[in-house]
Image (cartoon, rainbow, N blue to C red):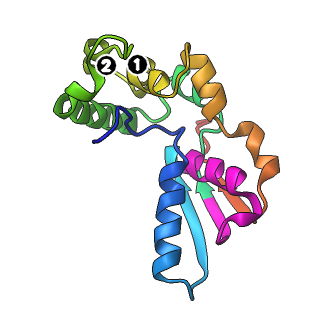
């Protein structure tokens, strides 16, 4: 890491960078995007921000949480994946603690190291990285529920039914 910022479903710049790299390397190709879970949220956010300037011709988003506050508040979005993501974030934080420590930075490193969910971790680190005072504000800004109408390319959304 070179900055005090870790993975979050709020990021669309990683998607943008990857798409720019791939289209530069294979400019003669036609591209479609696929995102799953938090990646679907990231892809949707990118598509809404890029609008007609995206080089993608279509996309598929599988199990997009759309509302990150709701998805992380009601039983974890997907318990197994939530635990693995949390563990991974903690491992990365342990290896790079010096970037997040220091007076004036505002990060709650010790709280993040004890996080039991992505939500706990994002409250201690991610929302602060993005300049938000509350997790609800951070998730509201990062969620894609209200962005679907701004998409300029065909997008197939496939949601998993959890009703049974």
Q: Residue 121 placed where, x, y %? A: 38, 23
Q: Which residues are magenta?
A: 40-60
Q: Is residue 154 above or below residue 82?
A: below
Question: Dot 2 corresponds to which residue?
Answer: 112
Residue 161's label in the rendered image is none
Residue 132 left/right relative to 146: left
- Give the image location of residue 27, x and y in percent: 55, 83
Q: Main secondary structure of the magenta part?
A: helix
Dot 2, crowdedness within 10 Å: few (<14), some or many (≥20)? many
In the image, taking residue 159 as reference, residue 52 lies left or right, namely: right
| Residue 46 belongs to magenta span | yes
Q: Position of residue 38 (x, y in %)?
A: 51, 43
Q: Residue at x 58, y 30 (%)?
A: 68
Q: Which residue is mark 1?
A: 120
Which residue is drawn at the image coordinates 55% and 13% (left, top)? 133
Q: Is residue 24 magenta?
A: no
Q: Secondary structure at mark 2?
A: helix
120 relative to 67, above or below:
above
Compared to residue 83, the image places residue 49 above or below, namely below
Residue 119 % position (x, y): 45, 23
Quarter of the rendering containing residue 62: bottom right
Say if mark 1 contacts mark 2, CB within 8 Å: yes
Quarter in which the C terminus is drawn = top right
Q: From the viewer's side, name the closer residue of 86 and 138.
A: 138
Q: Is residue 71 visible?
A: yes
């Amino acid at each position: 890491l070179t900055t005090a910022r870790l993975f979050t479903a709020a990021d669309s710049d990683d998607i943008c960078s990857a798409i720019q790299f791939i289209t530069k390397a294979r400019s003669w190709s036609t591209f479609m995007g696929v995102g799953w879970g938090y990646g679907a949220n990231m892809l949707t956010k990118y598509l809404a921000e890029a609008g007609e300037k995206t080089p993608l011709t279509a996309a598929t988003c599988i199990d997009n949480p759309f509302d990150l506050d709701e998805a992380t508040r009601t039983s974890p979005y997907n318990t197994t994946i939530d635990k693995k993501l949390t563990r991974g974030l903690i491992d990365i934080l342990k290896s790079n603690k010096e970037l997040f420590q220091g007076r004036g930075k505002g990060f709650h490193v010790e709280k993040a190291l004890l996080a039991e969910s992505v939500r706990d971790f994002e409250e201690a680190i991610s929302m602060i990285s993005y300049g938000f005072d509350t997790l609800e504000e951070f998730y509201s800004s990062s969620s894609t529920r209200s962005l679907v109408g701004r998409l300029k390319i065909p997008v197939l959304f496939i949601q998993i039914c959890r009703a049974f």
